Image (cartoon, rainbow, N blue to C red):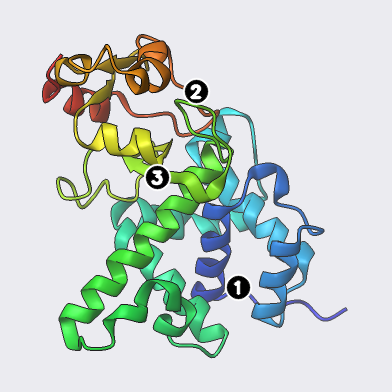
Amino acid sequence: MTKSPNWTREELILAFNLYLKLDFGKMHKGNPEVIKLAGILGRRTPDSVAMRLTNFASVDPYHQKRGVKGMTGGYNQVKPIWNEFNSNRENLVYESEQILANYKNETIEEAYSELTFDLTGLKGEVKDRIVKVRINQSVFRQMILKTYENRCAVSGIDIPELLVAGHIMPWSVSEQERLNPENGICLSNLYDRAYEKGLICIDTDHRILISKQLKEKKNKDYYIRFFEKFENQAITIPKSYQPRKEFLEYRLERFEK
């Protein structure tokens, strides 16, 4: 039997790209997304791709706590990619999408045409920067919706088209934490906007707080229907990558009760 060639860095990054977007229970050779990636890679079987996904789970602190283990050889192969993600998430995530587009014989703009269609008049560094930000935000959304099982943490709405990956510590504040899954909460558009504008907040016990400004609308029907009943109720907490306390505290310090 001919031994399969070692995985290249690009192949490992593509496996990691899928790992970020896929539930652990779906990381098996029969999953259509696993089969699709194997086809894109060309020389890898679905079984081989699934094994690499499990290797990434074995270096993920959340899954390590659950006792997930991988073969030593595979662990050592994927560990550098995981470390690179933790030290420079923005660049690695964007690079993974560029590699994926290249394997499909597409440009990054073609692969994400729905995000870049309005940039035809831009060129150079300005365009590159906007493309990178939009694509990274798209990947972050996929990561957060996966983590929260496609449900709004406040209302329970489970229609993906209505869901947003809200940042706890705002995008503009910390470049290092922009793509940290512990810095995201899955919210419907209404509650994401309210959270972003400081009309609601989430404390370190994961309870929903309502601002003084919003309470001035307490006699309005919409306030009673969409806000009052959630006050002091806990949001839905995901099994993995729960909101980090320090990020919640950042918001709380700036919240007007």
Amino acid under label 2?
Thr
Q: Nearer the viewer, mark 1 or mark 3?
A: 3
Provide the residue designation for mark 1. Answer: 7
Amino acid under label 3?
Ala
The answer to whether residue 123 is left or right of residue 231 is: left
> Label 2's element?
loop
Please state the horizontal and vertical placement of residue 47, each as a whole percent of the image: 78, 63
Quarter of the picture containing the C terminus is top left
- The answer to whether marks 2 and 1 mark residues whose Cβ atoms lie closer than 8 Å is no
> Label 3's element?
strand
The answer to whether residue 245 is left or right of residue 35 is: left
Residue 94 drawn above or below residue 156: below
Between 215 and 46, the one nearer to me in the picture: 215
Q: CA distance from mark 2 to mark 1?
A: 38 Å
Instruction: Residue at 59%, 46% (x, y): give it.
Output: 57
Between 240 and 140, the one nearer to me in the picture: 140
Quarter of the picture containing the N terminus is bottom right
Q: CA distance from mark 2 to mark 3?
A: 14 Å
**Mark toward the start of the polypeptide (1 vs 3):** 1
Note whether residue 168 is visible: no
**Mark toward the start of the polypeptide (2 vs 3):** 3
Q: Which mark is residue 165?
A: 3
